Amino acid sequence: MAGSTYMALRGFVLNRYLTGLPPKLRVHMYLHSGSLPRFDSSPGAMIRMRDSSTKVELANVVYSEISTSPFGFTVADENDQGRALGDLARLCDVTWFARFPYNVLIHSHLWLPILETPGPTMFDYRSASDIGDARLSAL
């Protein structure tokens, strides 16, 4: 699944006239407030996160995260329950943008969370002070 989804995503990005994404693929967006950019495209990387409210662990295939001021984007698969890691991280789902043809102007209001990207790890949005506190508590 990951290989065919990656090839479909690649075709979508390279052909401006295609609309729509593979059914389980999700694109999320956020405002990047950190000073370090993040460019990670590890096709088929598996990332696990724990939902703090339900204590359920989610695992998703993540294809890419690109983050540089002012925006960050993630591309990942949904899991079997129809949830993506972007939902868990409270990112803004912008997958629906893929329905529009190239070069079409639309007006939309989006709620974008403001997140830092202090390191190279995908879906790690802890602040630099949180990372420092974690390092100190590990000593």
Image (cartoon, rainbow, N blue to C red):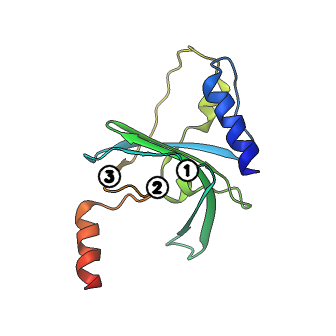
**In contact (CB < 8 Å): disc 1 and disc 3:** no
Mark with earlier residue (2, 1): 1
Q: Amino acid at mark 2?
A: Met
* Label 1 Cα crowd, 10 Å radius (few <14 / some 14-19 / many 20+): few
Residue holding disc 1: 42
The Cα–Cα distance between marks 3 and 2, rounded to whole angstroms, is 12 Å
Q: Amino acid at mark 1?
A: Ser
Camera-side residue: 104 or 66?
66
Foreground: disc 1 or disc 3: 1
The residue sitting at the bottom extreme is 139
Image spot of residue 139 (x, y percent): 25, 85
Mark with earlier residue (1, 3): 1
Q: Residue at x 29, y 47 (%)?
A: 36
Which image quadrant for residue 129? bottom left
Q: Residue at x 68, y 42 (%)?
A: 6
Q: Residue at x 25, y 61 (%)?
A: 128
**In contact (CB < 8 Å): disc 2 and disc 1:** yes
Q: Describe the element under mark 2 as helix, strand or loop.
A: loop
Residue 116 numbered tag:
3
Which image quadrant for residue 23? top right
Residue holding disc 2: 122
- Decide if residue 51 is on the left or right side of residue 11: left
Q: Describe the element under mark 3 as helix, strand or loop.
A: loop
Image spot of residue 45 (x, y percent): 59, 57
Q: Amino acid at mark 3?
A: Glu
The Cα–Cα distance between marks 1 and 3, rounded to whole angstroms, is 20 Å
Camera-side residue: 97 or 139?
139
Foreground: disc 2 or disc 1: 1
Above or below, 107 against 88 in this view is above
Residue 111 numbered tag:
none
Above or below, 11 against 105 in this view is below
